[in-house]
Amino acid sequence: MAQKIDNGSRCIIFLDIDGVLNTTKHNTQIYLQSQQLKHLKHIIENTDALIVLTTFWRHFHEYITYVLHRNGIDVGRNMLPLPIGTTLGKQCTKKFLHHHRIKQQENGYHLEEEEQGDSTSMIGRSADDENEYSSRAEEIEAWLKTYGERYLGGCEQQQHNNNNDDTNEEYAFHLTHWKYVILDDRPSAAKPDTPLYSRFVHTKTEIGLTEEDAERAIRLLKFGPSTK
């Protein structure tokens, strides 16, 4: 029976799907494979981590929650609800919306202004569009700035970062004791020489989340990045 952590704060899994819970980089639909789900469940059962979706499919939060539930994950305990349960995503920025409005117009769609402002629409978007992933690290940082102390613990527990990899003033908001992992197959999920990078489990797209990845994630979530 796995011991669950209950110290007033919880650890976080920033979860991608394509290339993590399956073995395909550019899926045309949500697809989760049983072996990779088994490894995710193992992480959760050993850490009691909360899940935040960073995936291209984040707007299908309810469906993904249902699939995780069907695979034995306690989503009531371990899945954060919307809006906290996802990073915002690049598609929610004005620049990215403008990009897709132009593409829609080029394809013959003439939308009224009020129809163009829906940031939750998946129409006109594609999983093979690299623009969808280019700001993933910034999206995770934005989530941490907003919710980090609420879920991972505040300043009263530990001072702000003073480690060698955390001296950048840009990351003054980031606390050293925060325990989270980023599960993603794309390098854009974490920048080198940042606190995120030391908590990044970089999966191989063609393999997805492995037993070795899961064990490393468990060590990071229990002990932090100082433990190799």
Image (spheres, rainbow, N blue to C red):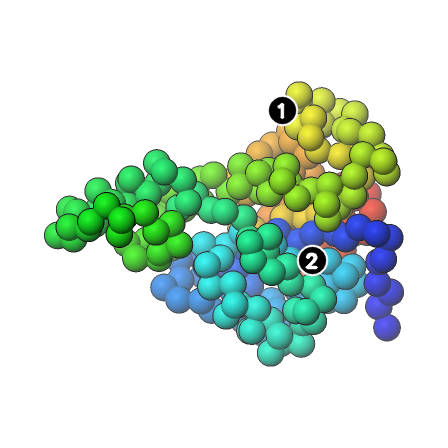
Q: Is residue 2 visible?
A: yes
Locate the C terminus and report the quarter of the image it occupies: top right
Locate the N terminus and report the quarter of the image it occupies: bottom right
Q: Secondary structure at mark 2?
A: strand
Q: Is residue 212 visible?
A: no
Q: CA distance from mark 2 to mark 1?
A: 25 Å
Position of 119 with respect to 190 (left or right) is left
Position of 6 with respect to 87 (left or right) is right
Tell me residue 50's x, y (percent).
69, 58
**In the depicted view, which residue is nearer to us: 154 or 187?**
154
Q: Are marks 2 and 1 in contact (CB under 8 Å)?
A: no
150 to 39, vertically: above or below: above
Q: How many marks?
A: 2
What residue is at 69 percent from the left and 42 percent from the top? 148
Lower position in the chain sequence, tag 2 or tag 1: 2
Q: Amino acid at mark 2?
A: Leu
Q: Which mark is residue 46?
A: none
Q: Quadrant of residue 190?
A: top right
**In the depicted view, which residue is nearer to us: 169 or 148?**
148
Mark 2, Cα crowd under 10 Å, few <14 / some 14-19 / many 20+, is many
Q: Amino acid at mark 1?
A: Glu
Tell me residue 202's x, y (percent).
60, 48
What residue is at 77 percent from the left and 53 percent from the top? 10
What residue is at 84 percent from the left and 58 percent from the top? 5
Position of 6 with respect to 201 (left or right) is right
Q: Which mark is residue 50?
A: 2
Q: Quadrant of residue 21?
A: bottom right
Q: Farthest residue to the left: give it.
A: 108
Which residue matches tag 1? Answer: 170
Q: Secondary structure at mark 1?
A: helix
**In the depicted view, which residue is nearer to us: 38 or 81?**
81
Tell me residue 154's x, y (percent).
79, 39
